[in-house]
Amino acid sequence: MRVLILSPTAFPRVSGNAVTAERWRRHLHIMGVDARVLGTEGMGPGELDRVLEGLEPDLIHVHHVFRAGRALWQGNGGLSQGIPLVVSPGGTDLNLDVNSSQRRRLMELLAARARFLVVQSQEMEARLLECFYQLGPKVVRVPKACAWFGDEAFDIRGKAGVGPEDFLFFLPAGVRPVKGNLEWLRAMEELHRLRPHVRVVLAGPILDPSYGQRFLEEVRRLHGFARWIGTIPPWAMRGAYEGADVVVNASFSEGLSNVLLEAACQGKPLLASDIPGNRWPVLGSGQEDPCGLLYDPQDPKDLVSKALLLVDDPGLGLRLSAAGRARSFQLASPLEEAASLASIYERAVTG
């Protein structure tokens, strides 16, 4: 079977969407599925049609309904009529784009064409049905996996000038408003005032130029304790996590963060914004011990108070670390994730 995965971004670009799509591609290949990933951001008119002519896919998997799916309506994808579709909504689809009437309409059209809609968490399934209750029969859940793309060493402390005696918070995320990089950095200034040995390192590409400019200005202003180190290659992320004391997700909207799953698997305590997409990876389903703390993204004081707990209580960090490692054994393997997708693809094509 030949499958074309449309994603807003694709390797070698670094983003959560690109990482997810590449994880799928690599493990689908092991399952015997010939999958190709095409990044849709910046795609020129007719480019998708040319790819479809050359690849002749049996199925198209649209990963992120609006950001990837709009390629089918922007002078691309004329040849896609009749090709079965599988769609996997992103966090911004269901938390932000759904509030725009124009974007919601495009999402409804694409969902109507899709044979199946794939979600990777209970929270995303509930939100999808809240927004589009009529799609219930099409919704299938595929548990999300964690995979590493390499074991290259990455000395995050050395690169950022962080000493062994410093307490390091690490926020890896593309720099754009929905990821909350700037707001989190500003709030951490108060934590550094209270605990001068705290350091913060942020990593990820600048994805929004205006927001990125303001972010870089704050990094320069707060250079005494904060560093932005640009993009870390995916094959070095495992090494980067090793140097952190706490790994952070500061998003205002999230589906299910690769970063939180990866960091928990590495035994790193998590500090994450209290939004629906972050609750399960941090707190579990109620039967597991938490592997991190949640904070109110609208309340900088709450962020500081939760961060102080992590700085001041080494025992808490050890308990959260152990819980994260235990949680990693409960996740689906990348091959199990790929097998579930392959089964859905087969049903979509033959049904």
Image (cartoon, rainbow, N blue to C red):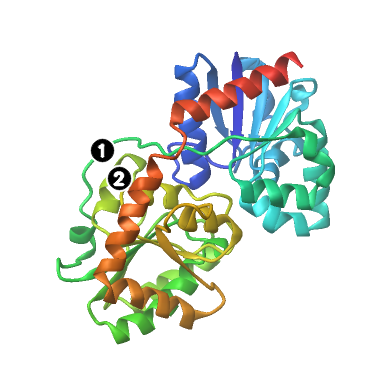
Q: Name which residue type carries label 2.
A: Arg
Q: Can residue 119 be seen in this view?
A: yes
Tell me the residue at 48%/58% (across/down). 283
Tell me the residue at 75%/39% (across/down). 74
Q: In this view, does 186 lie to the left or right of 191?
A: right
Tell me the residue at 83%/48% (across/down). 105
Q: Which mark is residue 208?
A: none
Q: Decide: is 68 above or below 317.
A: above
Picture coordinates of residue 17, whole percent (x, y): 53, 43
Q: Mark 1 points at which residue?
A: 151
Q: Name the residue under label 2.
A: 238
Check disc 1: other Cα within 10 Å, few if <14, some if 14-19, many if 20+.
Answer: few
Image quarter for residue 246?
A: bottom left
Picture coordinates of residue 38, whole percent (x, y): 57, 31
Image quarter for residue 220?
A: bottom left
Total marks in image: 2
**Gap between marks 1 and 2 measured at Cα:** 6 Å
Check disc 2: other Cα within 10 Å, few if <14, some if 14-19, many if 20+.
Answer: many
Tell me the residue at 52%/26% (across/down). 338
Q: What element carries label 2?
A: helix
Q: Nearer the viewer, residue 74 or 1?
A: 1
Q: Name which residue type carries label 1.
A: Asp
**Quarter of the image with the C terminus in it:** top right
Picture coordinates of residue 32, whole percent (x, y): 50, 13
Query: Do residues under tags 1 and 2 come within 8 Å of each other at their CB atoms?
Result: yes
First in sequence, mark 1 or 2: give its number: 1
